[in-house]
Amino acid sequence: MQTQRFGQFLINRGVVSEADIYAALASQEAEKDQLGQIAIKQGYLTVKQVMEVLREQAGTALYFGEVAISMGYLSEEELYLLLQFQQDSRPRLGEILVETGKLTGRERDRLLQEFKALSDRGEQAVHDKGAAVTGN
């Protein structure tokens, strides 16, 4: 069972349109910090190293992290941590929907609680089903 995403939950509830979610996701993507910037802020790379990675990356279909690893500037573990920082630094979908007037803060909080409750029940149902099969 795949966990439903919050945006799809809001669409299914009729609270926002698909277009609203796509616009919010585009805004979310545009507002996230670039990996090189995060690597500098977190002390993993210098400005010079980031510039070298960007030069090497230019004209390729490779991701910044792939190039940084191939150049020996980052380990896979460091890249994973930087990607987590990047994920955590981007604005949340609910925040964007409030900022754009699609939801009020109170609506967002209530819907997040409902979504979390449904998600928790879904996870519990999967766990219970597995326990029944394994006898645990």
Image (tube, rainbow, N blue to C red):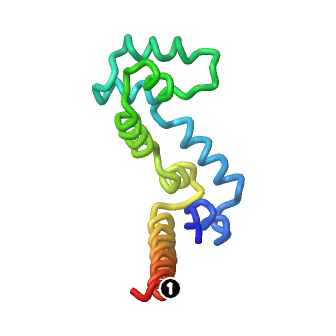
Splitting the image into 4 quarters, where does residue 5 fall? bottom right
The residue where tag 1 is placed is 133
From the viewer's perspective, is residue 102 above or below residue 43?
below
In the picture as drawn, the residue positioned furthest to the front comes out as 134
Residue at screen point 70% across, 57% down: 18
Name above or below for residue 44 compared with residue 4.
Answer: above
In the displayed structure, would residue 23 be above or below residue 125? above
Q: Position of residue 132 (x, y in %)?
A: 48, 88
Measured as percent of width and height from the top left, residue 100 is found at 57, 49
Of the pair 24 and 131, the residue shown nearer to us? 131
| Residue drawn at 52 percent across, 49 percent down | 96
Residue positioned 52% across, 11% down in the render: 55
Q: Quadrant of residue 28?
A: top right
Can you give x and y, in whole percent of width and height, for residue 90 in the image? 45, 43
Q: How many marks?
A: 1
Farthest residue to the left: give it.
43
Looking at the picture, how far across and down is residue 44, in whole percent? Answer: 31, 26
Q: Secondary structure at mark 1?
A: helix
